[in-house]
Image (cartoon, rainbow, N blue to C red):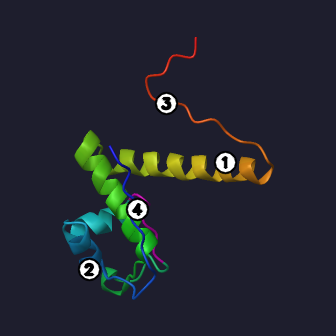
Amino acid sequence: MRAVTTTFIESTPLSVRELARAVGAEDQWVLRLVEVEILHVAEPAAPPERWQFRSADLQRALAARRLERDFGANLDTAALVLELQAELQRVRALLGAHGIRGQRSTAGSDDR
């Protein structure tokens, strides 16, 4: 199986409705992503009609959607998984900056 890489280019910010349509969801689903902190908005107290999202938000929304679809994860679980993935990336970057190469484990491998 070939890995697929998607590149997003910063462009005009997306509204709640545009982001929802881009991931095949309802507007309420996007509001829930903000509620569980998968997505962050500059002014959470502002009405959702004024919220704006960028390509990185679209990537996170798509990742949450895949977690729901592929693993049956609820959004609270998806938020935790996404946060752990981001933390792992930060740790790997920090190790790489210090010249330490981290090893990736493969699922199902036996280290005995």
Q: Position of residue 20 (x, y in %)?
A: 24, 71
- Label 3 close to label 4 by CB (< 8 Å): no
Q: Is residue 69 above or below residue 6?
A: above
* Classed neighbour count for the residue bearing mark 3: other residues with Cα under 10 Å, few (<14), some (14–19), many (≥20): few
Q: Secondary structure at mark 2?
A: helix
For label 1, count other residues whose C-alpha is less than 10 Å away and answer few (under 14), some (14-19) or many (20+).
few
Q: Which residues are magenta?
A: 36-41
Residue 55 is at least partly visible in this image: yes
Mark sitting earlier along the chain (3/4): 4
Find residue 43 and name its label: none
As drawn, is 97 to the left or to the right of 60?
Answer: right
Q: Which residue is mark 2?
A: 18
SS for tag 4?
helix
The three-letter code of the residue at mark 1 reads Val
Query: What is the x, y in percent for residue 103?
Result: 63, 35
Relative placement, left or right, of 97 versus 46 is right
Mark 2–mark 1 CB contact (< 8 Å): no
Q: Which mark is residue 91?
A: 1
- Residue 51 versus residue 23 in the image, above or below: below
- Residue 106's tag is 3
